[in-house]
Image (cartoon, helix red, strand yellow):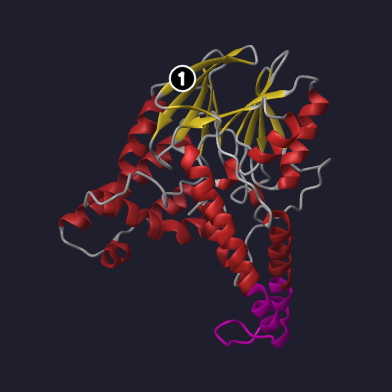
Amino acid sequence: MRSTGRLMAAMVMLAASLAPVATGQAQEDSYPWVMEEVAPGVFAALQPSETRFGDSNSAVIIGLNEVVVIDSQADPAAVRALIAWIGAATDAPVGLVINTHWHGDHTQGNAIYRDVYGDDLEIIGHASLVEDVPERAGAFVRERTAYFATELPAAYQRLEQGVFRDGSTMTEADKEEQQAVLARAELWLAANRDARFVGPNRTYSSRQRLRRAGRTIDLVHYAGHTRGDTVVWLPEEGVAITGDLLDDLPYVGHGYPTSWRTALDSLRDMPIVSTIPGHGPVFRDDTKLNAVHGFLDALITQATAAAAAGQTLEDAIATITLESWRDRLASDDIAARFFEQSLGEAVERAWLEARDELEQ
């Protein structure tokens, strides 16, 4: 969470053991979320810490006659499990799904919500999602399906021979680890081989105020983590649902660093009590916001200097130093590993932006 940047990082699953990613392993009646009520009737469905970068959090707003869900996740079993949780919590149907951006870990479940709640269900997102959900998120799943279908037989053969791709010998522990990785890849294929991607049937362009589930819900567009980010703001409750614009670790591989930094300045000006991020725990203060802002500021400053000095992208990646931000942003080894895997993409986006070559 690359169409879902974090999912693309998991393409190395066949070579190394990473957290499970949208595998379809969830039990529909017992998915291990932390359901946290951040305001009366406003719940954060938080992914377990060890798999928090594999699939997204969701937010659930329960009204008397309607439920609103923000971000629909990817794992089909997890989506159905959350729908079951909603059904146990209220008799009100889900009438609206809001997508905070196009990445598949936030939109792939749209199709299941549509199947369960019918054609009257509204799905709303920024106007760019009409194109980006099917053409970018959908394309990623198709590409990854083809990749696994091609690579799995060879990976099983290497496992049987006890050698890695580079010819080095596996230990018994390596073999056990690789077996687990391949099993997760098989589960992912089974869950996603026939994945459908349904984009919004209602869009907005800049800012829109809704009155749904008995609440005021503001949708505010930013270009930051993607070109079509939405912050869902509940002004009466002081709750912001930010998607990946502000979450446990910034992924910049589809980002717009300068406008992302400006977007975080806007969040600073809002009277936020609680933030439900796309990944990670609920934030109760500005600590994470300030850390992400500082990282983006350092990234932009160094990439701008590299571009001005005429450095190639390869030289910029080699010389820009952001390790101190890894230590500040990453709370565990999972996050630190992802930071390292995605840092080159972050530098590339900032370097391209400094050269005025970043696509819109």
Which of the 4 image quadrants contains residue 200? top right
Closer to us: 141 or 26: 141
Q: Is residue 149 above or below residue 272?
A: below
Q: Is residue 349 left or right of residue 230?
A: left
Residue for point 45% across, 57% down:
342
Please indicate, yes or no, whether residue 331 appears anywhere in the rendered image: no
Residue shown at the point (80%, 24%) measured from the top left? 89
Disc 1 marks a residue whose amino acid type is Gln
- Expressed as whole percent of the image width and height from the top left, the position of residue 225 reads 43, 42
The secondary structure that dominates the magenta segment is helix
The magenta span reads: 151-178
Residue at (27, 53) in percent of width and height: 352
State the image coordinates of residue 259 (x, y, percent, origin top left).
32, 37
The mark tally for this picture is 1
Q: Which residue is mark 1?
A: 208
Residue 274 image point, x, y percent: 55, 25
Question: Which quadrant of the view contains residue 296?
Answer: top left
Residue 25 in view, yes or no: yes
Q: Is residue 142 magenta?
A: no
Quadrant of image for the C terminus: top left
Residue 155 among those drawn in magenta: yes
Q: Is residue 261 above or below residue 104?
A: above
Q: Residue at x 81, y 47 (%)?
A: 27
Helix, strand, or loop for circle 1? strand
